[in-house]
Image: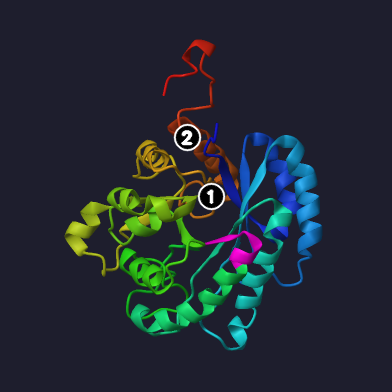
Amino acid sequence: MNQIKIGTLISAGEALSVIPDIADHGFESFSLTFWKTVGDIDLPELAKRLTDFLAPKGITISSLSIFSNPLAGGSEYADAVPSWEALIDHASLFGTDLVTGFAGRVIDKSIDESIPTFKNVFGELSKRAASKGVKIAFENCTMGGDWQKGNWNIAHNPAAWELMFNALPDEHLGLQWEPCHQMVQLIDPIPQLRKWAGKIWNVHGKDATIDWDVIKQYGIGGAKQFAWHRTPGFGDSNWTDIISILRMNGYTGNIDIEGYHDPVYKGQLELTGQIHALNYLKHCRGGSYVANPEAWKNRQ
């Protein structure tokens, strides 16, 4: 049974100290995040120590992630492409075939103007990934940007995905999707998920709460906050529907909780909120797998 595993994001620099403390709470996978750079982390050593600890527990590494700007160039982002390359080259040591992150953008240029650079950079990275049996997925956070300007990521809007995948129609390129980043743009994630499920290879478990009263009174450009990022189980999304749509489209990836954003379940309540989300998402997928009786083996 290919069950959708439920896990959480962990900073790679903290993985060896944090994972042993939380692994027995029921997480089924961990997604390792390296933020802007792999830096001086010894990837083979980290992979060995983590897999030695996790493998006996049946816990997997779902993905490796780098959140920098590989399209920007310049000294501030000089390590972005080398970090993508390092994670692609070492992914198999972690037991994963998925490397994720921001697509980047040409700073303060429109998404349209960033596409040629995207094609050049990820054309090469996708070839590297293919040679290693690895897939690349783009996270869909705006990072404060819009269609016309931004400093981080073009992969935050479905119209941008159309441009990206038309420029690079590569089977090794897909999406790391979460409903929150669409909801705060006032995009309904459910019809979007139905359309794009075949390109989604990892899901970030993060939700949102939208205050429609604020929007109706003040719009989205006023002083009042109209949306909050939430841990799953505390936001507006129907995760039973999300998981059902994923399954109906043959999804075999993981859902990894992205914590440290909830306005209530934070600080001393961070792990409390994450464990609630873990159990909630397991409930939404139908609970634990239960094998059918032998007499039902031929039923579909």
Q: Is residue 294 above or below residue 170?
A: above
Residue in the picture at 62% in, 55% down? 97
> Among all residues in the image, which is located at the extreme bottom?
74
- The foreground one among 135 and 216 is 135
Residue in the picture at 65% in, 79% down? 79
Residue in the picture at 70% in, 56% down? 92
**Res 237 label:** none
**Res 266 label:** 1
Which kind of residue does numbered mark 1 sit on? Lys
Q: Is residue 51 magenta?
A: no
Which kind of residue does numbered mark 2 sit on? Tyr
Q: Which callout, 1 or 2, points to the residue nearer the camera?
A: 2
Label 1: state its secondary structure.
loop
Residue 138 at x, y percent in the picture: 48, 64
Mark closer to the chain start, 1 or 2:
1
Q: Is residue 258 above or below residue 167?
A: above
> Among all residues in the image, which is located at the extreme left?
216
Q: Is residue 130 magenta?
A: yes
Residue 245 at x, y percent in the picture: 36, 41
Stretch in magenta: 129-136
Q: Is 63 situated left or right of 218 in this image?
A: right
In which quadrant of the rendered view does residue 125 lie?
A: bottom right
Residue 104 at x, y percent in the picture: 49, 75
How packed mark 1 is, by other alpha carbons closer than 10 Å (few <14, some 14-19, many 20 or more), is some
